[in-house]
Structure formats: structure tokens, C-alpha cells
Image (spheres, rainbow, N blue to C red):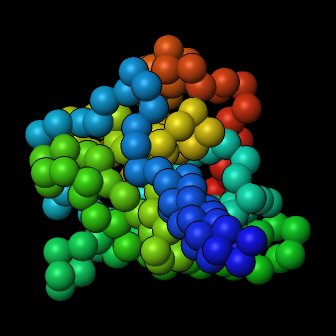
Amino acid sequence: MKTFYKIAIPVSLGILSFTILNSCSVGIPKGATAVTDFNSDKYLGKWYEIARFDYKFEKNMDNVTANYSLNSDGTIKVQNRGYNYVKKEWKESIGEAKFVNDKSEARLKVSFFKPFWAGYNVIEIDDDYQNALVVGNSTKYIWILSRNKEIPNSIKERFLAKAQKLGYNTGNLIWVKHD
């Protein structure tokens, strides 16, 4: 019986560790493709969160922004900031993003709590890098971002149609207020 435990416990811990790390997938939803010919330098800077699903880590937040800047090692610093209107306080999270493949493909992985990484995929962006549709690794994660506090209706409709086609329930989007 002791031999069984000597084998079963390490194997079980290994499977558990693999399952936990694998749950932090950096994939892309089925049918979605990341933007190619992506210019990360044009993407850097401040973005306003226009819409999102209701995530635990952004619960009750308005005035949400994301600021992307280049780190000296070539990774991207991710600085998310928002106002929790229930607790009446500003919250900030700082993380890091890395390209999954080539820098010209808008597939990144982001971490706020290493060694856990999540998918960050820009699947639609306008030519001027003013509005972006970003998804995670599944249809549970979606963001509409803009350089401005509001997004043109034509872009909004285009992004919503694309998200719906991929299986996102856009009726569940939270439209973020900005002062």
C-alpha cells in the first residue's frame, strides 16, 4: 500500500498542476483569427474600455483604461486602471504581455499573476489603430477598446456582428461609463 501512495501522490499532483496551468490557456476562440500585419508600436498607448463581459476582476468598474508601453526587454507593460463605483476607489493592475508567435500577429499572452497567462487576441482593428476588438482564449472574454471615450456607431455595429458570428452573446456586454 505504501508503494501505491508513493506513486499515486506525485502522479496526482503532476496531473493537477498540468490541469491548473493548462486552464490558463493562451489560445484563441474557434473561428477567430488574430490581426496580421499588426503594428505593435501603433497599438501602444492609452485605450478606453468601451464594453466588456462582467468579469470578477472588473466588477463594478467604470472609467476603465488600459495603457500599453514597451518594456526594455521587448515585452509590453500592461497598466489597467478603473474606478470601482461601489467601493468609491480607483483600482490598478500592472501586468506583462508577450507575443505568442511573431510580433506581426496580434496574438499575445498576458499575465498579472505569473506564472499564469491568459490569451489576448486582437481580432479586429481599424486602419488608424483607433478602435479594437479583443478576445481572450474563449467566448467568455471580450473587450471593445477605443482611443476615445466613445466609439463610432459603424465600428460598434461591425465589432458586434463579428463577435456574434463567433458565438459571443453580445447582449451580455457591459457598456463602460467614462466621465
Looking at the image, which residue is at 73% across and 32% down?
A: 172
- 144 vs 142, nearest the viewer: 142
Q: Count of labels shown?
A: 0
Residue 103 located left or right of residue 56 = left
Looking at the image, which residue is at 41% across and 51% down?
A: 26
Q: Work out which quarter of the rendered image holds the C terminus and state it.
A: bottom right
Residue 115 located left or right of residue 130 = right
Residue 111 located left or right of residue 33 = right
Residue 13 located left or right of residue 98 = right
- 157 vs 70, nearest the viewer: 70
Q: Going by the picture, which residue comes out furthest to the bottom?
A: 72
Position in image of residue 106 (x %, y %): 26, 46
Image position of 86 with respect to 124: above or below: below
| Residue 28 can be seen, yes or no | yes
Image position of 105 with respect to 99: above or below: above
Q: Work out which quarter of the rendered image holds the N terminus and state it.
A: bottom right
Image position of 101 with respect to 91: above or below: above
Query: Residue 126 sits in which quadrant?
Result: top left
Query: Residue 86 sits in which quadrant?
Result: bottom right
Q: Going by the picture, which residue comes out furthest to the right?
A: 86
Looking at the image, which residue is at 70% across and 53% down?
A: 55
Position in image of residue 108 (x %, y %): 32, 54
| Residue 24 can be seen, yes or no | no
Position in image of residue 50 (x %, y %): 56, 46
Looking at the image, which residue is at 35% across and 35% down?
A: 123
